[in-house]
Image (cartoon, grey):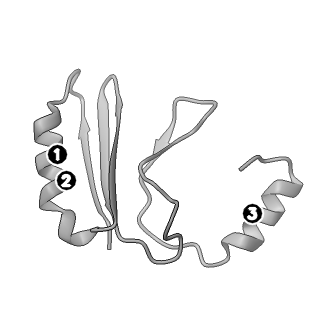
């Protein structure tokens, strides 16, 4: 199971503090870790890879909008969903 952190409401987050928080969660997600920072929020995640072993780096940021997600879970019908979304014009 992945580990997720969020710091909200601070204009600046100390990288050393974020790294320490992620290090304390490394046993929950030893395969990858990452952070995203916004003006008033920093997200971080340690990742345990189950299906998407090579990709799936998190947190994830939307390419066209100022949005991000940190997701802990597996979508087992992702191939079917991806096919439907591509048919609607979504780009992956």
* Residue identified by numbered label 3: 82
The quadrant where residue 81 appears: bottom right
Q: Measured from the top left, where is residue 62 in percent x and y?
A: 57, 39
Q: Which is closer to the viewer, label 3 or label 1?
A: 1
Classify mark 1: helix, strand or loop: helix
Please tell me whether residue 69 is drawn above or below residue 72 in the rendered image: above
Q: Split into 4 quadrants, where in the image is the N terminus?
A: bottom left
The disc, 3 or 1, on the residue closer to the chain's N-terminal end is 1
Classify mark 2: helix, strand or loop: helix
Q: Measured from the top left, where is residue 92 in percent x and y?
A: 71, 50
Classify mark 3: helix, strand or loop: helix
* Residue identified by numbered label 2: 22
Q: Residue at x 44, y 59 (%)?
A: 71
The quadrant where residue 57 appears: bottom left
Q: Residue at x 34, y 60 (%)?
A: 32
* Residue identified by numbered label 1: 19
């Amino acid at each position: 199971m992945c580990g997720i952190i969020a710091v909200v409401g601070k204009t600046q987050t100390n990288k050393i503090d974020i790294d320490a928080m992620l290090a304390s969660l490394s046993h929950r997600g030893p395969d990858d870790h990452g952070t995203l920072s916004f003006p008033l929020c920093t997200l971080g995640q340690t990742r345990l890879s189950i299906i998407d072993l090579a990709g799936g780096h998190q947190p994830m940021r939307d390419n066209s909008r100022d949005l991000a997600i940190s997701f802990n879970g597996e979508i087992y019908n992702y191939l079917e969903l991806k096919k439907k979304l591509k048919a609607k014009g979504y780009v992956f």
